[in-house]
Image (tube, rainbow, N blue to C red):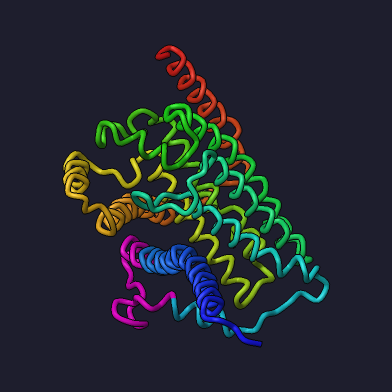
Amino acid sequence: MIIDRVEVETINSFSKSELLKELYGLIWILPILALLVGITIEVLVIVWLEREISASIQQRIGPEYAGPLGLLQAIADGTKLLFKEDILPSRGDIPFFSIGPSIAVISILLSFLVIPLGYRFVLADLSIGVFLWIAISSIAPIGLLMAGYSSNNKYSFSGGLRAAAQSISYEIPLTFCVLAISLLSNSSSTVDIVEAQSKYSFLGWNLWRQPIGFLVFLISSLAECERLPFDLPEAEEELVAGYQTEYSGIKYGLFYLASYLNLLVSSLFVTVLYLGGWHFSIPYISFFGFLQMNKMVGILEIIMGIFITLTKAYLFLFISITIRWTLPRMRMDQLLNLGWKFLLPISLGNLLLTTSSQLVSL
């Protein structure tokens, strides 16, 4: 069989186009990998900051032996958990027992899809971005309840029930706060919400237009993260360790990772919804206006936006860490009363007030 030159060139061009398509498909994976690496580094930094800040508040020495200034302590702890024995309860539901930690971590990781870390730096700019985050965050307590039920331990089961009750109690006022922000921005897209706050520099932040909603959102997000004084599902004095009692090794490490991932997601959403996201001030806007005039918008703009977003997020992280080591734990009845009798009416009133103001302005 004889193949002429034209057929050979056609075959070569076809193979090259297929190779380019495969390379193009791999390029789309790079932002996701970069985001995962960045999330991992951020979690390690948050763990180190919490230990250093708590040590300073309690006037004691924090981690200092694993790496310079104890920077590698979180890596050392993760490595230890990775190689520890994975103990399974003999009378527990093993499939559910193994799936529970995975659900808790994956549901929180999916929230990063709609978080705009910088200008044009978001994986999925969806029209219902904020409500998708609320829906995804509602999945995590299912994993906790599944873990408590499958452990065949009354303390673990009580911790799972507490986690579900706490999530339901504080998800509703948090949703009302997000709905009020959506009404102000005329959009549920996280990118549009950030852009709506950039008109008047930092004076246009939703923090000044929604101070009541900001406080309710702050308290509700801490309760969603199960941080002190709202860590009732893991109350060591009452439930040994809650739904984590029967877990060890890497599965326990996944729950530990999920708690800090949830805190990071909440701090980023506080930044996006109330603190203007990657926008900062008039000099920042004029600086990037100069770059746009000179067609120099690119990597520098993205890096600056990420830096500003993370700086604001770390302010919330510092507040949450300080609260953890300052306030005592609440009782379960106090936690439910705060959610249903105080935060829910306040958030509903804030939503009605926001709706009325928007109707008057039409």
Q: Seen in the image, is 337 located left or right of residue 5?
A: right
Tell me the quadrant of the picture where the C terminus can be found: top left
333 displayed left or right of 346: right
Image point (59%, 46%), residue name: 331
Q: Is residue 292 above or below residue 157?
A: above
**Where's the N terminus, which quadrant?**
bottom right
Q: Nearer the viewer, residue 347 or 133?
A: 133
- As displayed, is residue 240 above or below residue 1? above
Quarter-of-image position of residue 69: bottom left
Which residue is depicted at the point 43% across and 17% down?
357
Total marks shown come to 0
Please indicate, yes or no, whether residue 204 appears anywhere in the rendered image.
yes
Range covered by the magenta-colored residues = 51-74
Image position, residue 241 (x, y; %): 62, 64
The spot of residue 185 in percent (x, y) is: 42, 30
Judge from the rendering whether residue 326 lies leftward or rightward of residue 246; answer left or right.
Answer: left
Residue 57 is one of the magenta-drawn residues: yes
Residue 43 visible (yes or no): no
